[in-house]
Amino acid sequence: MKQICVISGKGGTGKSSITASLAQASIQPSVIADCDVDGANSALFFEGTDIEHTDFVSGSRAHIDTDDCTQCGRCIKVCRFNAITSSADKYSVNSLACEGCHACAVICPSDAVQFIENTVGMIFRRTIKTGELIHARLHPAQDNSGKLVSKVRDRAKEVAAELNIKQIWIDGPPGIGCPVHAAISNVNAAVIVTEPSVSGIHDLERVSALCSHFGVPIMVVINKFDLSASRTAEIEHFLGLQNAPIVGKIPFDKQIPLAQCEGKTLFQMDAHNATIHAIYNEIDTRIGILHSSK
Amino acid sequence: MIIAVASGKGGAGKTFVATHLATALAREGKQVVYVDADVEEPNGHLFLHPDITEQKSSKRLVPFLPSGNCIGCGNCQTVCAFHAILVLGKQVTVFDDLCHGCGACLLACEHNYLSEKHVPIGDIQQGKTNSLSFVGGTLNVGEPRSTPLITDVVQTALASRKTNADEYVIIDAPPGTSCSAVAATEAADLVILVAEPTRLGFHDFQLAFEMATVIHKEVAVVINRADLGTEELRKFVHEKKLPLLLEIPFNDVVARMGTEGNLAIDEDATVAEQFSALSEQIIHRTEVSGGRQ
Ligand code: SF4
Ligand code: SF4
């Protein structure tokens, strides 16, 4: 089974549309794992209804029992996340600030702190034209610790194994923190989507440094490559030094966001269909997408 | 006045709006601090080109066992909710990446054997452009959690203010709706959500709006690439009676501006007018509300 993660450092580079397109370009079914759980939107590209929804519980949040609490103030002192507040007659915990560390419970002489399981988000499964889609939703203001991302990937692997599907396309999260670490760990390749802009190049440098930190091989797609010949050349130069291949270039096209309004991917646009096929083939020649690993 | 510029997803034009609003306010003669709190992929400096005058390292605390006193009771391991500490015999191993620095293990160790040390998580840069002050953070590559650095960046920026009621702090928040976005917007008096009127953009906007509601923030909206897409977003904004501060039509200059790292406000008269109108509205709102801090 091959796992390929599409990332970009920053959002808005057409990452989701490219992930969906690559799955569509394959003649074989695939599982898409939408790991951009804080802003997941792959589901908007694929018609269908979710056949599974599971709550994702991770960690817990403190709750102070007002009957037992003597308002001694020890917990307020030890909580490093300023999650406990006192009002005239009671102590309460701000569950958005609480990290569930249990420090308050350790110090509390009256056993007044209880812990309540924390539902961080939900995971969904949907059967789509290209195979299966596992997507998730992080509830607002929750900690995107990477655990939900790992869970989405685990579910994607289970479903792929069950249905004998050989490829998992991971729509990766933005940034370079935990969720990205969880999305790229142990993948066969990370496809980085970049743009020829000062910020695009800066993000590319950081995200490729992260991949090499984790020993993940990278391949690069330059989106809107014709916006700046000099910046595109700069990207090519940078990647040359890294020995990282460019697997495709997509031109700037005002029609792309318009097509997205109708839920159309790049693959479904006549102007870009061939480019997507070519990108798929480039990745395929490098890692043998449908060949069994090991 | 503290304003956070946020969006449910990257790519909506958050940095574009934040850098241009900060510049436009400065051109109206206001004191402005621009804060780049998107520490995983900071980009504001690429457009504002500040002279960095101060740089400091931001750190977090992690526990360690300084001497061989440990009796191997395992209390610290039992109490750690993040599985960050492991006791084998009388050896204590701390996994820095998993540690939240909560200090629970220190409290659990009855003999006070554990100690804490600082580990660097990123850098905070402070500087100036011709017209405004700049504070930004850069997360170290490989560091898992950005929230502690974001909080440090925002606090540094707020501490740098000169208790001037006329001062504006513009925070460029990280994308998304999770706790890192909350850390960047928490101190704000107003959250400006930047959204695209496309189907995906509207979806992202709703998530961001939900986050702002959960943390009880006042929300205003800027619609970017306003001529692409559908009416859904405008309808929603209208129904919720949210102030729609500005609509920015798709503009080639803006699309190309990113390639060279210039501000479109300097290159395009329409963009300059749009942002001067936006800053006037912000100034007006601040004066009407008596400039809450
Ligand atoms: S569990 Fe930790 S973060 Fe939550 S209230 Fe207690 S001490 Fe604070
Ligand atoms: S400080 Fe908290 S998170 Fe870190 S090892 Fe100790 S108990 Fe675990």
Image: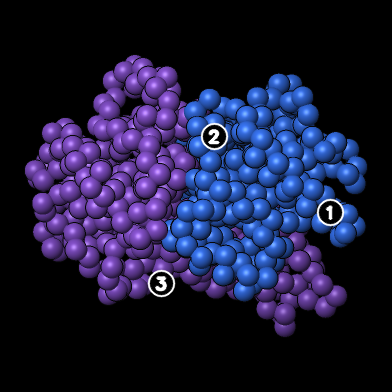
Q: Secondary structure at mark 3?
A: strand
Q: Is residue B32 above or below residue B50?
A: below
Q: Is residue A139 left or right of residue B270?
A: left
Residue B88 in the image, given as x and y percentages of width and height: 42, 45
Question: Who's blue, chain-wise?
Answer: B
Q: Dot 3: within a 10 Å radius of its alpha carbon, few (fewer than 14), some, or many (20 or more) residues? A: few
Read off the chain for label 2: B
Residue on which the image places disc 1: B284
Q: Is residue B164 visible?
A: yes
Q: Nearer the viewer, residue B150 or B254?
A: B254
Q: Residue furthest front?
A: B269
Q: Amino acid at mark 2?
A: Val
Q: Is residue A81 visible?
A: no
Q: Any mark on residue B253, and which? A: 2
Q: Colour of chain A?
A: purple
Q: Secondary structure at mark 2?
A: helix
Q: Residue furthest bottom?
A: A67
Residue B136 in the image, given as x and y percentages of width and height: 66, 34
Residue A190 in the image, given as x and y percentages of width and height: 30, 38
